[in-house]
């Protein structure tokens, strides 16, 4: 009987393991990678109770309208300032440049920032930070605004893909300290792209 029990145990494990390793949800590569990161206990900002039942973040449907080419006006002599965060900590940032772009026939501007700490971290020397607020905040998207990661471009243009906008970790867990989006980065339009508010269905 023993070989049968071993075989039965093996089959049971195969079935349960297959159920555990569900296909990661997501319409795009970015969405699948973000969902995988949030599901993984070693990289997830989610509280344990939320991660336990996590199946995937809610996203706006991918829309190529929200992939825009912006002109970048570099501001090389700007000083570092203390960007406020959701805790007493401040983040040393400077305005790396001003992005100008058109979205749905209207012209918009955003400041893009460079963090002092990240400049000194290997692999992040060319990292830029694009936080923004828009008119979906507090409704479909997180009230505190969203972020987009970027790298310093070689030329004077930069692609902004709002479909890759994600929430600050504070949207999921108040143990994190997150930079507060400066008011000058408010877009007077609805950005129906990227990650939606957590827990709103």
Image (tube, rainbow, N blue to C red):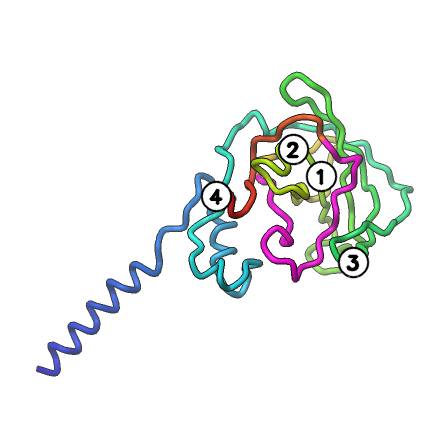
- First along the sequence among labels 3 and 2: 3
Which stretch is magenta? 164-186
Mark 4 residue element: helix
Q: Which mark is residue 159?
A: 2
Q: CA distance from mark 3 to mark 2?
A: 24 Å
Mark 3 residue element: helix
Indicate yes or no whether the magenta region holds residue 191: no
Q: How many neighbours does mark 2 have within 10 angstroms: few (below 14), some (14-19), or many (20 or more)? A: some
**Quadrant of the rendered image containing residue 193:** top right
Q: Which residue is mark 1?
A: 153
Q: Tell me the residue at 56%/38% (across/down).
A: 194
Q: Is the residue under label 2 in contact with that under label 1 (CB below 8 Å)?
A: no
Q: CA distance from mark 4 to mark 1?
A: 22 Å
- First along the sequence among labels 1 and 2: 1
Instruction: Tell me if 82 is positioned left or right of 63 in this view.
Output: right
Q: Tell me the residue at 87%/49% (across/down).
A: 81
Residue 190 position in % (x across, y down): 62, 28
Q: Is the residue under label 2 in contact with that under label 3 (CB below 8 Å)?
A: no
Q: How many neighbours does mark 1 have within 10 angstroms: few (below 14), some (14-19), or many (20 or more)? A: few
Q: How many neighbours does mark 4 have within 10 angstroms: few (below 14), some (14-19), or many (20 or more)? A: few
Most extreme residue toward the bottom, as rendered?
2
Of discs 3 and 1, which sits in the foreground? 3
Q: CA distance from mark 3 to mark 4?
A: 28 Å
Q: How many neighbours does mark 3 have within 10 angstroms: few (below 14), some (14-19), or many (20 or more)? A: few
Q: CA distance from mark 3 to mark 1?
A: 20 Å
Q: Which residue is mark 3?
A: 117
Q: Which residue is mark 4?
A: 29
Q: Is the residue under label 4 in contact with that under label 3 (CB below 8 Å)?
A: no
Q: Tell me the residue at 78%/58% (across/down).
A: 117
């Amino acid at each position: 009987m023993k070989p049968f029990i071993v075989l039965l145990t093996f089959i049971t494990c195969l079935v349960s393991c297959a159920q555990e390793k569900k296909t990661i949800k997501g319409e795009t590569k970015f969405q699948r990678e973000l969902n995988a990161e949030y599901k993984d206990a070693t990289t997830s900002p989610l509280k344990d109770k939320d991660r336990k039942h996590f199946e995937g973040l809610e996203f706006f449907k991918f829309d190529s309208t929200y992939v825009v080419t912006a002109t970048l006006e570099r501001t090389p002599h700007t000083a570092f300032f203390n960007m406020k965060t959701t805790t007493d900590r401040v983040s040393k940032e400077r305005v790396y440049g001003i992005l100008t772009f058109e979205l749905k026939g209207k012209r918009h501007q955003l400041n893009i920032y460079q963090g002092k700490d990240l400049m000194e971290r290997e692999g992040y020397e060319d990292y830029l930070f694009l936080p923004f607020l828009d008119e979906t905040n507090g409704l479909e998207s997180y009230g505190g605004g969203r972020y987009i990661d970027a790298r310093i471009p070689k030329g004077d243009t930069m692609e902004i893909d709002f479909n890759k906008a994600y929430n600050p970790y504070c949207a999921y867990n108040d143990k994190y300290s997150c930079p507060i989006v400066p008011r000058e980065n408010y877009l007077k339009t609805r950005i129906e792209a990227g990650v939606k508010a957590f827990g709103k269905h």
